[in-house]
Amino acid sequence: MWSDLLEENGLAVVARDGQHVEVHHRQQSALYRVVRAKRRMKPSDIGAPPEHNSILVAEALSQAAATAACDLGWSAVPDLGPAWINFRGRIIRLREDETKPGHGTESPARRGRPGFGIFNLLRTMLSLNVGSTQHELADYVGVTQARVSQALHTLRERHLVEKADDGWVVADRSAAIRWWLDQYPGPGGISTHWFGLDPVVQQAKRAHDLLVREQARPVVSGDVAADLVAPWRTPRHALLYAKRGVDLNAASLTPSATQEATLTLVVPADSGVWPIVPHRFEIEDVGDISRASALQVLWDLRHASGPDTTEAAQAWLDWMLKDRASP
């Protein structure tokens, strides 16, 4: 997916609606209109951008078309060809090319861990737990079959997946989960922090219900999610993911500094935090609530604050391996 290239270069992408995304880089952000073109773009195809900040997403961009687009103020993230983003007055190159898309460019952020695609592919394979073709995996993950093939090659080199008679499968479930946990860069996106006086599970439920009413598709993670399935300790902090942010004052919560927060709401850049099959749980005297991907819960437990986070994460991992929980 085109946004993977931005994420691999240190820019977080958060969808705002069907046509706009918010791009975050070094504690700054900018809103962009996304324009898609399913063909190779030539200079004659390039017109003025519809909005001041606009990103051109195309199958391919010739060097001449890239120069024309950059001169007109476009950002561009094609599958093939020069890629760059015009971010708050400076150009950040995303893909090296012989023809630079403008002057005064900034070197791209250091290329580190891979984008979300390979992690969501492994999540999917762990969740399906059956052999799948590359085409089936591409449909589940929402990426091209070429990207699935590339990711499978990388995972196969690490002996994490293999080709079986009925398709691609996870070779070693425990090793695959450990690799995912060690390499996953985190969900990205935007976080807001809130404080409440009631028990954390009740805070999570009220926030969850408000987000449901706002059609923000919430799921809980971290302490609360673990407590729903494999109780190990009393939840100390609530973590929810949603497709968009909502003012949680209506859920009897107040904005808070990170250190004092009892609840965190994240609008993630990674859609993989939502499981393939929804997991819903009934909380006694409270009602039902939806859980994030089991792998996401594991990662969040591992990165939580507190003296016993390692033990909490290990308890969740033991449950995942014992019950072959769907990630």
Image: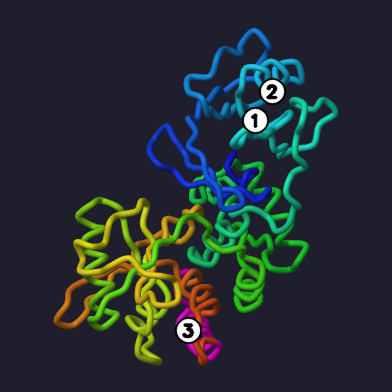
Residue at the image position 68 percent from the left and 48 percent from the top: 9
Q: Is residue 69 magenta?
A: no
User: Is 324 on the left-hand or right-hand side of 194?
Assistant: right
Task: Give the secondary structure at mark 2.
Answer: strand
278 w.r.t. 231: above or below: above
Pointers 1 and 2 in contact (C-beta within 8 Å): yes
- The image position of residue 83, as x and y in percent, is 69, 33
Residue designated by label 2: 61
| x and y percentages locating residue 207 in the rendered image | 26, 66
Q: Quadrant of the N terminus?
A: top right
Query: Looking at numbered disc 1 in the image, what kind of residue is underneath it?
Result: Pro
**Mark 1 neighbour density, 10 Å: few (under 14) some (14–19) many (20 or more):** many
Q: Is residue 101 above or below residue 25?
A: above
Q: Which residues are magenta?
A: 310-327
Say which quarter of the image contains residue 198.
Answer: bottom left
Q: CA distance from mark 3 to mark 2?
A: 46 Å
Task: Report which residue position mark 3 lands on.
Answer: 316
Most extreme residue toward the right is 98
